[in-house]
Amino acid sequence: MFSLVCQHGTFALHHTSLQNNSDEWELKKIIQLPGQYYDYSVSTVGAAQGVLFFQCAPDGIHIENVDCYSMDVKTYEITKVCTKMDDFLNLKRALPYFSFPPLLSEPTI
């Protein structure tokens, strides 16, 4: 299980798992999120195919730049996917799309 934890204005993901034949959770790893997000709002936005998605935005601003990230749950590698302008008062907002099917992906050699 991944939990988003804020301590003293900085954010980290805590990876915990159940022990064999036990009801106790063991902390496997703490993954620090990028440090520039002090006094930001960080939220998870989903998970798919072994990847966790989250976004970071300044607190208290209605129109803002939102940084979108992905994290591979096996390697803990965090990748910035995009920065988007988001207006929380406007219901028509663009959301990032991850894991394009091969037909829609860019050609590779």
Image: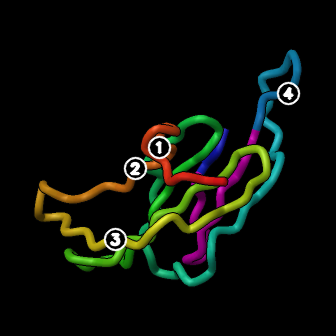
Name the element at disc 3: strand
Q: Mark 2, residues whose alpha carbon is within 10 Å: few (<14), some, or many (≥20)? A: few
Q: Which of 61 and 6 is in front in this view?
A: 61
Q: Which of 102 and 30 is in front in this view?
A: 102
Q: Name the residue at 86% across, 15% down.
A: 21
Q: Nearer the viewer, residue 23 or 37?
A: 37
Instruction: Name the residue that disc number 2 marks.
Output: 97
- Residue 84, numbered label: 3
Q: Is residue 8 magenta?
A: yes
Q: Which of marks 4 and 2 is nearer the N terminus?
A: 4
4 vs 1, front mark: 1
4 vs 3, front mark: 3
Q: What stretch is highlighted in magenta?
A: 4-16
Residue 39 lies, in percent from the top left, at 46, 80
Q: Earlier in the sequence, mark 4 or mark 3?
A: 4
Give the spatial CA distance, label 4 vs label 3. Answer: 40 Å
Give the spatial CA distance, label 2 vs label 1. Answer: 7 Å
Residue 94 lies, in percent from the top left, at 25, 58
Name the element at disc 2: loop
- Residue 100, numbered label: 1
Which amino acid type is shown beneath numbered disc 3? Lys
Which amino acid type is shown beneath numbered disc 4? Gln
- Label 2–label 1 contact, CB within 8 A: yes
Which amino acid type is shown beneath numbered disc 2? Tyr
Give the spatial CA distance, label 3 vs label 2. Answer: 12 Å
Q: Mark 1, residues whose alpha carbon is within 10 Å: few (<14), some, or many (≥20)? A: few
Q: Name the residue at 11% across, 62% down.
A: 90
Q: Name the residue at 60% across, 59% down.
A: 5
Q: In this view, does 102 lie to the left or right of 71?
A: left
Instruction: Name the residue that disc number 4 marks.
Output: 19
Name the element at disc 1: loop
2 vs 1, front mark: 1
